[in-house]
Amino acid sequence: MVAKKRLLTGLQSSGRLHIGNYFGALVPFRTLYTEYESFLMVVDYHSLTSVRSGEEMRQNTYNAIRDYIALGIDPALCTMFKQSDVPEHTELAWVFDCLVTVPFLMTGHAYKDKVAKGIPPSAGLFTYPMLMAADILLYDTDVVPVGEDQRQHVEFAREARAKFHTAYGETFKEPKEQIRKEVAVVPGIDGEKMAKSRPQYSIPIFATRDEIAKQVMAIVTDSSGERPENVYAMHKLYKTEAELQPLYDANKGKYKALKEALIEDIDALAAPMREKRASITDDDVKKILKVGGEKARAVASAKMTDVRQKIGVAL
């Protein structure tokens, strides 16, 4: 029997998931995860670059797992765990920090973008790519589903792998990114990329109908055209262009009617997921994370035993 390839994905426990997360990361993961030996990780240490409240961090972690399950991910079919439950992540990240250079890290797009948006330029934010490299390489990951804007993180992981191999010999499998190009970047209500760091421009996956209506009605439109492009770009996530064409042809210039149609389509998808999410308790989440954490730790620990031997810290 041929062993399944390994897939790893994760989202920060740093706020409410939005429809950009859903279409850009979670739908691809839900489609793929049963085809692989899949690891789904709540990257809570990454979240320290922006979250400064312990209680907020804990609640975000509960919510992240609750969200994944409500979105149809079966914890019996993948390893769901918390990054901080596997200390090998930060240990390997330090090893990689000692192999790559500051000029190399300075080429990171994500760091520049986040600092430009006002996020403090902490050392953790700067070396973030090496912790992500550790996340990926610890599990001999074959496939990493990411948005287009995160392609560089997987490239950085390959570079960290190459640096380690040059110094110490073959150790890690080479990971490949997997990008759904048609939804790699999901627009927010201002037309820019939807992001949890900009919640005022996002639509949460589990938003109430009133929240959905408020955000959709606030979508920026261009009054010079017959079709509101920002509304249409979001609507294409929910229906095919063939399904949308008659609606948009019949409502040229009627932006309110088109927004109301978008509200209906978003809520039709969100309503059953909201109901399922409400039924998942914190205790349910703790049990899932305990089982997943033990499995992930076993895999990561075996890899770090090899790494420690090669770098000479194991006597």
Image (cartoon, helix red, strand yellow):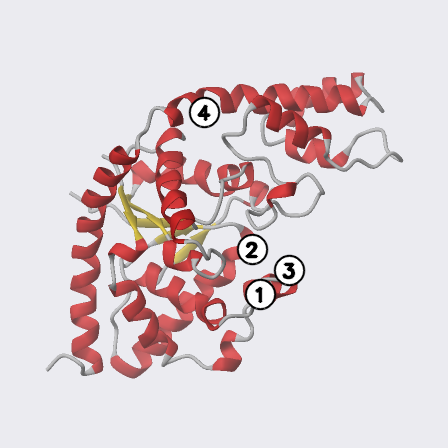
Provide the residue designation for mark 3: 117
Provide the residue designation for mark 4: 274
Instruction: Looking at the image, tell me whether mark 1 or mark 3 is earlier in sequence order.
Output: 1
Q: CA distance from mark 1 to mark 3?
A: 12 Å
Q: Is residue 139 left or right of residue 235?
A: left
Label 2: which secondary element: helix
Horizontal and vertical percent for residue 133?
Answer: 38, 65
The answer to which image quadrant residue 59 occupies is top left
Q: Nearer the viewer, residue 224 or 272?
A: 272
Label 4: which secondary element: helix
Q: Nearer the viewer, residue 178 or 49?
A: 49
Q: Quadrant of the C terminus?
A: bottom left
Instruction: In the rendered structure, find residue 248 and report the number of the disc placed on it.
Output: none
Residue at left 51%, top 56%?
150
Q: Amino acid at mark 2?
A: Asp
Q: CA distance from mark 2 to mark 3?
A: 15 Å
Label 3: which secondary element: loop
Instruction: In the rendered structure, find residue 149 and report the number of the disc placed on it.
Output: 2
Provide the residue designation for mark 1: 109
Label 1: which secondary element: helix
Q: Is residue 119 left or right of residue 230?
A: left
Q: CA distance from mark 4 to mark 1?
A: 34 Å
Does residue 72 appear in the picture of this structure?
no
* CB within 8 Å, label 1 to label 2: yes
Q: Amino acid at mark 4?
A: Arg
Horizontal and vertical percent for residue 125?
Answer: 49, 67
Instruction: Looking at the image, tell me whether mark 2 or mark 3 is earlier in sequence order.
Output: 3
Say which of marks 4 and 1 sits in front.
4
Say which of marks 1 and 3 sits in front.
3
